Image (tube, helix red, strand yellow):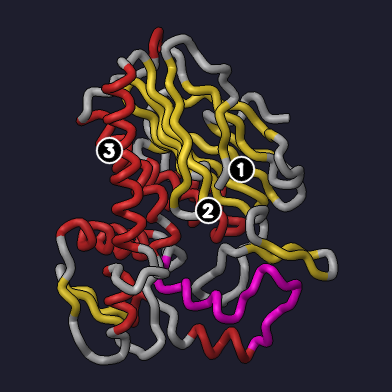
Amino acid sequence: MSQRSADEAAPGERSFEFSAMGSPCRIAVEDTPGEVAQNAVAAAIDEVRRIEAKYSRYRPDSIVSRINAAAGKGDLIEVDDETAGLLAFASDLHAVSDGLFDPTTGVLRSVWDFSLARLPAQAEVQDVLGRVGWHRVVWQRPRIALTLPGMELDFGGFGKEYAADRAAAVLEAAGIASGLVNLGGDLRVVGRRTGGRGWVLGIAHPRQPDAVFASIVLRAGGLATSGDYERFFELDGRRYCHILDPRTGWPAQGWRSVSVAAPACLAAGAISTVAMLKGSAALPFLREQAIDFLAVDSEGGVFHEGLGGGAS
């Protein structure tokens, strides 16, 4: 997911860069005194890092690791309200996406290594698919259990988007009237920009590294992009990306990228990911959501509603 600012620094704008969730991040605020801006941004960064620590599958002390460690043991793990809310979101989205959005697909990384141009055997994929599926999860809010040994939850599909929304909320609570949170390309606008201007953003080109494919203006809400160009390999003329279909265990095909603008970054990221997995049904799905989008198909065809007037 990659967007970058196309703005020149505006008068009164302060920009803060940091790293989190394996990505370069940036928070920009406008028309805010230096000490106020620094304190607000520090609190927002702390919030991002809190979420990373809480939900990272790489940290043995995270709630996700605790749930995964209990897989197949029959224990219902009670979670706090924040985690319950995220699990409820994932459960609801699993239902409305016909199972395409599934937080248990992370275990498929055991057979897909995108640093190697190697296809797994179908038998390998089928073996891991036996441990994939939200229908195999017992979810009785606020308690959850993974019913099979080796099952895993992975919040990687929506954790960064949620963190962008939370960082924006922290900035607003600290009195920031205008700003932008960018967590590795997952974006959330804070308040309204001075003079009614929007944030001019560049959508990454899905086939030309470090190039901008389209320029858009975002005045409110969130923006996220899902694409086949960040973790992938090519073999025999075909591209295989990290967005994996929970029904088949194989990478999504048919779209190079899908960018979505929505009231929250969490919603934008979920919709863009599901659209990538929808294949030929992506455009009707996107139009049903009544949101702005820019989509590039596998042949380079461009489809947009509300976004992408500057596509090139």
Residue 128 relative to residue 92: left or right: right
Local secondary structure at mark 3 = helix
On-image quarter of the C terminus: top right
Q: Is residue 120 magenta?
A: yes
- Cα gap from disc 3 to disc 2, whole angstroms: 34 Å
Judge whether 9 appears above or below 285 on screen: above
Residue drawn where x is 38% and y is 63% of the image: 155
- Please state the extent of the stretch shown in magenta in the rendering: 102-122
Give the residue displayed 68% in from the left and 30% down from the top.
311
Q: Is residue 96 left or right of residue 84?
A: right
In the image, residue 86 sits, relative to residue 103, either above or below, namely above
Q: Which residue is mark 1?
A: 295
**Residue holding disc 3:** 43
Q: Which residue is mark 2?
A: 275
At label 1, the amino acid type is: Ala
Q: Position of residue 3 (x, y in %)?
A: 56, 37
